[in-house]
Amino acid sequence: MQLTEGSVRASFSKVWIPMISGVLAVKAIGVSDAYFVGQLGEEKLAAISYTFPIVMTLISLAIGLSAGASSVLSRMIGADASIEDQAELTTGAIGMAVIISVALSLFGFAFIGPILSLLGAEGQIHQDARAFMMIWFAGVVFLVVPVATNGLLRATGDGVSPAILMSSIAILNIAINPIFIFGLGPVPEFGMQGAAVATITARAVATFGAFYLLWRKDLLATSVSALKRGLGRWQQVARIGLPASLSTSVNPIAISIATAAVSTLGSAEVAAFGLVTKIQSFSVVPLLALSAAAAPFVGQNSGAGNTDRSRESLWFSAQVSVIWALALAVFFYFAGGWLVSFFTDSEATREVAALYLAIVPLSYAGYGVIISLTAALNGLGRSVSGLFVGAGRAIGLLATGAWIGVLTGGFLGLAIATFVANAVSGLIGLLIIRRHALKEVDARRGTSPDCYESD
């Protein structure tokens, strides 16, 4: 689908709206894993908790590759590159995904034990977590490839197919989770390792589905020479993908630093922060979908030289972010205490969690602006700029502010610091949207890939 013609809002929404359901579905997988594994006992739940940072790192690498390949492809489409060149790039990107997957598997098999020990896993918990991750590393190709193909499909302007794929992964994963965890009929009981088996199985099905969709769009080349030429573009993809991977990683890192700050207050505050972080991850799904749509939209319009359309799409994303944040602020202010009561019986935890939800949600508008801007910069091929923008908010403002807030005002200080970090970063993002040239890198003229140019 060409995103370079017609109404900006209508074209942008054709990618954005379907992605809401896709992102929401993927979020549900983690909840499903925690729910079913939690029924096996506290130790099993603790074991799977140790795998989360490792899995998030793998996902960050996959998203980086996806962002790099999507950026190059979307700009090729905007510049009316031939379908043969597009297929060559797509096939090469998939080949890169497979090569990266093999490298990750070998690394994981060799070092997963020591890594888990560094994270603090011991005894039976260490053994369970290691067995879980060994299954993950054995099937990591089915993690990396679907994420890459999902980005490539979005680069074509198709928001429906990636959303269907993401939803299908989630539905199948959740449906077969209890079968592999607890056993059913001829399927043996795998215990917590069954969650990994279910995930790999669902993503394997999605991988073949993605191949079919790319083939239908004539974006899969079958010749060895085309694959070699596509692999030869690795520098183009890596130049965007590596910073994009780091950019994806900074938010979990910032949350980990903030958690360390909250841990100085007490167990009720730690539980409350963990709870509001989970609630937040679901409440900002429409904003995450905005960022998923921003990269291909800006990439295509950049390739076509439509700077005004790129800028208008970012203003639209900002407006949606403000409206959604206002709605969340009103809801959580009046219903935050009622909502958290479903998750905990602790009065102390409910009280501080409700306090956070009464203050922070309005600032999600700034968060929405920043993640859409970061995705757009990736789409332009300016991923180092995107990294600085994302890291500036997450590490420079959020993580640092969390410690200052906790030390000066306890959990209330944390909430205020989070609000300020999101609000300030959002205002900076609006200034960048207004002043940035929003043009893609032109290597032929020697344009710096990561400079801010004023109109």
Image (tube, helix red, strand yellow):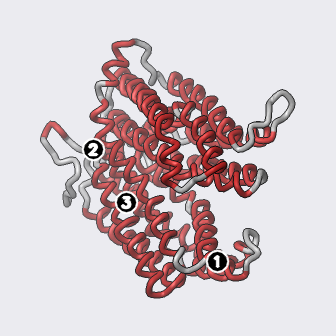
Mark 1 closeness class: few <14, some 14–19, many ≥20 residues within 10 Å: some
Residue drawn at the location 32% of the way across and 38% of the way down = 238
- Along the horizontal axis of the image, is 441 left or right of 86? left
Mark 2 closeness class: few <14, some 14–19, many ≥20 residues within 10 Å: some
Question: Which residue is denoted by mark 2 in the rendering?
Answer: 305
User: Whole-Å distance between the Cαs marked 1 and 2?
Assistant: 53 Å
Residue drawn at the location 36% of the way across and 27% of the way down = 89
User: Whole-Å distance between the Cαs marked 3 and 2?
Assistant: 25 Å
- Label 1 with label 2: CB-CB less than 8 Å: no
**For residue 160, above or below residue 450:** above
Query: Which is more N-terminal, label 2 or label 1?
Result: 1
User: Whole-Å distance between the Cαs marked 3 and 1?
Assistant: 30 Å
Question: Which residue is denoted by mark 3 in the rendering?
Answer: 390
Q: Which numbered marker is on residue 434?
A: none
**For residue 336, above or below residue 202:** below
Q: Nearer the viewer, mark 1 or mark 2?
A: 1
Query: Which is more N-terminal, label 1 or label 3?
Result: 1
In the rendered image, residue 232, in percent from the top left (x then y), is placed at 29, 25
Q: Is residue 182 visible?
A: yes
